[in-house]
Image: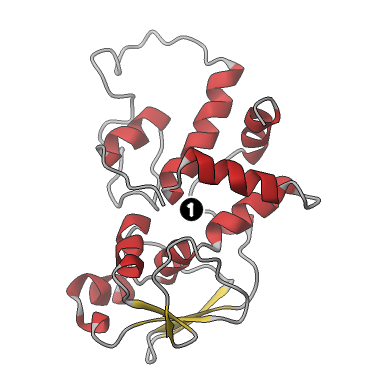
Amino acid sequence: MSRQTGPRLKRMRSLGMDLPGLSRKSIADRPYPPGQHGNSRRRRKDSEYKKQLQEKQKLRFNYGVHERHLRKLMTEARRFGDTGTKLLELLESRLDSVVFRAGFASTIPAARQLVNHGHVMVDGRKMDIASYRVKVGEKITVAPKARSFKPVEESWKHPAHERPNWLVCDAQEMSAQLTSVPSKDTLLFPLDVNLVLEFYAKRM
């Protein structure tokens, strides 16, 4: 688990894009890097290393994972044919990510807080491990007490983003069930996963 302690908007501006899992705010008003010369018209051409690093950082910041954990997921993903697809599947199937995508929380940090405080259940059992990997067929619900929390109520009724097709949500029961493995086509932000693979190819 990686706790985001710095200014989230600043992180997104440094990457030049919104990261829905990190914050509901947008960089639209200041779509340039932070700092004294961020809005300067003179820009150096990005190196290949910088492009690879930025794509990798998108994953780190959006999903809120430590570098060590991301490397561990890369190692696991390499055992499969399509490494990039598997890596994204592993990140999207984390419990905090599924709670966010289902609409129980407005961001992944908010979803992680719900999980860590014991307000999330998987198939009726309390699960307080944010990195728990949700399996196909498992049903996610929030504890009865947490359903009345205003942030949870608001997020469930008015989710920040469209729910993905690999989740089936029951509005009355206030539950979400994983019906298939998460698809890279449903990512909420643009990503060149091949650049992420290139970044780690030289460092692992």
Residue that carries the numbered disc 1 in the rendered image: 188
47 in relation to 27, above or below: above
Q: Quadrant of residue 146?
A: bottom left
Left/right of residue 42 with respect to residue 163 in the rendered view: left
Left/right of residue 101 with respect to residue 118 in the rendered view: right
Helix, strand or loop under label 1: loop
Dot 1: within a 10 Å radius of its alpha carbon, few (fewer than 14), some, or many (20 or more) residues? Answer: some
Foreground residue among 39 and 174:
174
Foreground residue among 40 and 156:
156
Number of callouts: 1
Q: Does residue 190 appear in the picture of this structure?
A: no
Identified at 61% across, 49% down, the residue is: 73
115 in relation to 71, above or below: below
- Which x, y percent locates residue 117? 28, 69
Residue sitting farthest toward the bottom? 172
Amino acid on which disc 1 is placed: Leu
- Which x, y percent locates residue 139? 51, 83
- Which x, y percent locates residue 14? 37, 28
Identified at 34% across, 32% down, the residue is: 13
136 in relation to 191, above or below: below
Identified at 63% across, 60% down, the residue is: 183
> Which quadrant would the C terminus be assigned to in this image?
top right
Q: Does residue 70 appear in the picture of this structure?
A: yes
Residue sitting farthest toward the left? 150
- Which x, y percent locates residue 94? 51, 62
Identified at 30% across, 63% down, the residue is: 113
